[in-house]
């Protein structure tokens, strides 16, 4: 049986058997609705208002909820059999705390009785997905932005940067903007999320953004409850905030300048290799116009060597940007488990959860 690869993000959990050139079998929201055990069937609609987020800003926070989610994914979605569990590989966000890694491996062996375990950092896996072992990943996810230089398959942690902003913050920004333009409309965050996915885009450059803010075609959109709103210049604010964080009230440099600053703290002889093998990943990075704007900003940056984006191989699925960590995990699983580089049950029983730091890189 193939190993299972799990990439548990703040917005979606992706899981499936390790087939590198295919999309994950299961992509489901990580947020869970809670139904009280004593709720009558007619009252279960109230569960829409009671939710829990097992993963916050990329890290597992609610372990009971994560256990329930994984139990559904593994035994119902992927049809594992109790008593005949297989091997599993998890993707690790940048700077995952040691206690989180240890608790995860403990859950896998002691609760799910897996036969083998491995974990690897998302930055490394996203590079594997495009056929690289060195480069720099810019991961713009739902709850965070991770910028990570990777040399020969090893993340350069001292040069990496993590920002606790992401797609969820951009959704709230869009909600504020839309509320100002449509003061009589009651918006809920789920509707705004869908509006962001449908309308949000990046302007070609800062000048173009300023022009569109002054004069932009306005569209009407009917919400599921029948309310009608207008959306125009707001669609550009979402993407612009990644290049001008001051829009979010942050005193930070834009995302391209942050990339250059990260790499400047790596040994000079590696600068070109890292910058010229830049990979965009994460759901927010698939926003319309984001890649084009990123490349244009790269040509304007202060660095002597400018970032160049790696194009994914033609045989890989189109949504590689969204699923690159999972696909890289599927590639790695084909190596670590057949070559016995993973943590076995015997090794875990002998050494305990701390073995994850010695065997999983």
Image (cartoon, rainbow, N blue to C red):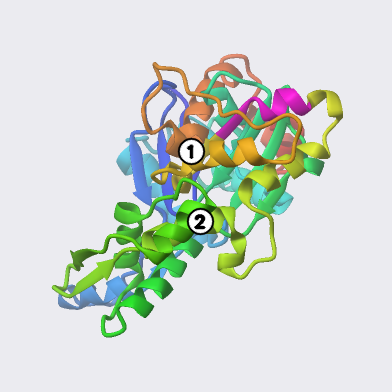
Disc 2 residue crowd, few under 14, some 14–19, many 20+, Cα 10 Å: many
Disc 1 residue crowd, few under 14, some 14–19, many 20+, Cα 10 Å: some
Q: Circle 2 sits in a helix, a strand or a loop, which is it?
A: helix
Residue 214 location, quadrant: bottom left
Picture coordinates of residue 53 (x, y %)?
Answer: 46, 63
Please give the residue where the numbered disc 1 appears in the rendered image: 291
Describe residue 241's horizontal placement relative to residue 273 as left or right.
left
Residue at x 59%, y 51% (from the top left corner): 145
Q: Circle 1 sits in a helix, a strand or a loop, which is it?
A: helix
Residue 194 vertical position relative to residue 354 in the rendered view, above or below: below
Residue at x 54%, y 47% (from the top left corner): 140
The magenta segment is: 271-279
Residue 121 visible, this angle = no
Residue at x 55%, y 25% (from the top left corner): 310
Picture coordinates of residue 37 (x, y %)?
Answer: 31, 72
Q: Is residue 103 magenta?
A: no
Residue 222 vertical position relative to residue 298 in the rendered view, above or below: below
Q: Which mark is residue 240?
A: 2
Picture coordinates of residue 209 (x, y %)?
Answer: 47, 56
Q: Marks 1/2: CA distance? A: 12 Å
Q: Which mark is residue 349?
A: none
In this view, the residue in front, 100 or 170, is 170
């Amino acid at each position: 049986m193939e190993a299972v690869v799990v990439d548990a993000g703040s917005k979606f959990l992706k899981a499936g058997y390790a087939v590198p050139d295919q999309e994950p079998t299961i992509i489901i929201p990580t947020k869970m609705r809670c139904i009280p055990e004593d709720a009558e069937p007619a009252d279960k609609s109230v569960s829409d208002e009671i939710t829990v987020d097992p993963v916050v800003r990329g890290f597992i926070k609610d372990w009971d909820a994560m256990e329930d989610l994984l139990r559904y994914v593994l035994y119902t979605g992927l049809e594992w059999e109790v008593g005949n569990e297989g091997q599993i590989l998890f993707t690790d966000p940048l700077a995952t705390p040691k206690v989180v890694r240890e608790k995860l491996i403990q859950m896998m062996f002691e609760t799910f009785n897996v036969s083998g375990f491995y974990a690897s950092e998302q930055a490394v896996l996203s590079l594997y997905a495009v056929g690289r072992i060195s480069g720099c990943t810019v991961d713009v996810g739902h709850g965070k932005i991770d910028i990570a230089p990777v040399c020969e398959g090893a993340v350069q942690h001292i040069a990496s940067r993590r920002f606790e902003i992401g797609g969820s913050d951009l959704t709230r920004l869009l909600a504020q903007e839309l509320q100002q333009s449509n003061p009589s409309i009651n918006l809920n965050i789920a509707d705004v999320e869908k509006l962001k996915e449908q309308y949000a885009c990046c302007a070609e450059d800062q000048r173009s953004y300023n022009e569109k803010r002054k004069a932009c075609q306005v569209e009407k959109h009917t919400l599921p409850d029948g309310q009608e709103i207008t959306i125009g210049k707001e669609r550009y604010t979402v993407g612009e905030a990644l290049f001008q964080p001051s829009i979010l009230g942050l005193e930070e440099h834009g995302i391209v300048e942050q990339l250059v600053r990260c790499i400047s703290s790596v040994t000079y002889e590696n600068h070109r290799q890292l910058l010229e093998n830049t990979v965009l990943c994460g759901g927010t990075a698939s926003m319309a116009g984001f890649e084009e704007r990123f490349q244009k900003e790269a040509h304007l940056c202060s660095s002597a060597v400018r970032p160049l984006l790696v194009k994914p191989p033609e045989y890989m699925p189109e949504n590689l940007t969204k699923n690159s960590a999972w696909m890289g995990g599927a590639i790695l699983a084909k190596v670590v488990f057949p070559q016995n580089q993973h943590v076995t049950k015997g090794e875990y029983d002998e050494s305990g959860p701390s073995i994850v730091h010695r065997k999983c890189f």
